């Protein structure tokens, strides 16, 4: 591989797989359990969830987006458009989807917790889970230079 591309590819792969594992944990365990936290302490619970998860998610999502951009803009001519373009596309979708849709959804939940809002969060998060899963599989398959 091209000098530097191995490191960037590895960082992208690692951050994507980290986020894929985390999103599955959130989707299958954490978000569904939120309904059991509804009650007088929900706002404190949710505020702490949001504060703490940001310290885990923001650095990894930022790394994933930055390495996706570096792959696309610096190594596309060597690695190919699809091999660099799709990772950037997937990373952009999850990063901006989180910022523009999921953070406001969490804000709504903070202002007015309800079973319906938690259900909406779980259902909507299926798309993020799918995108990260497909992204992770693509990185493994494309590393074998199938594309």
Image (cartoon, grey):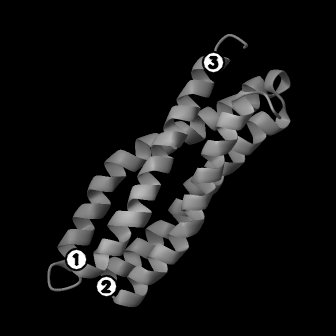
Against 147, is 110 above or below?
Answer: below
Q: What's the mark number on residue 6? A: 3
> Where's residue 64, x and y in %?
55, 39
Gap between marks 3 and 2 measured at Cα: 45 Å
> Is 46 located above or below residue 40 in the figure?
above
Q: Position of residue 116 (x, y in %)?
A: 41, 89
Q: Earlier in the sequence, mark 3 or mark 2?
A: 3
The residue at the point 69 percent across, 42 percent down is 138
Q: Do the CB atoms of the residues marked 3 and 2 lie less than 8 Å apart?
A: no
Front disc: 3 or 1:
3
| Residue at point 33%, 88% (across, down) | 114
How many residues crowd mark 2 within 10 Å: few (<14), some (14–19), many (20+)? many
Mark 3, other Cα within 10 Å: few <14 / some 14–19 / many ≥20? few
Location of residue 1 by image quarter: top right
Res 94 → quadrant: bottom right
Q: Secondary structure at mark 2?
A: loop
Q: Which residue is under mark 2?
A: 113
SS at circle 1: helix
Residue on which the image places disc 1: 43
Of the two numbered discs 2 and 1 on the same chain, state the one appearing first in sequence: 1
Residue at (39% x, 61% y) in the render: 26
N-term-proximal mark, 3 vs 1: 3
The residue furthest left is: 40
The CA span between labels 3 and 1 is 44 Å
The image position of residue 55, as x and y in percent, is 32, 47
Discs 2, 1 touching: Cβ within 8 Å: yes
Foreground: 21 or 82?
A: 21
- On screen, residue 124 above or below 1: below
């Amino acid at each position: 591989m091209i000098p530097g591309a191995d490191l960037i590819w590895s960082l992208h792969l690692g951050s994507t797989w980290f986020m894929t594992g985390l999103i599955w944990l959130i989707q299958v365990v954490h978000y569904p359990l939120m309904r059991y936290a509804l009650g007088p302490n929900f706002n404190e619970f949710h505020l702490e969830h949001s504060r703490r998860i940001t310290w885990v998610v923001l650095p990894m999502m930022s790394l994933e987006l930055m390495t996706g951009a570096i792959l696309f803009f610096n190594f596309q001519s060597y690695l190919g458009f699809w091999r660099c373009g799709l990772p950037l596309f997937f990373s952009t979708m999850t990063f901006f989807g989180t910022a523009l849709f999921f953070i406001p959804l969490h804000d709504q939940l903070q202002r007015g917790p309800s079973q319906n809002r938690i259900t909406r969060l779980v259902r909507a998060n299926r798309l993020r889970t799918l995108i990260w899963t497909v992204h992770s599989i693509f990185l493994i398959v494309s590393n074998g230079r199938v594309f």
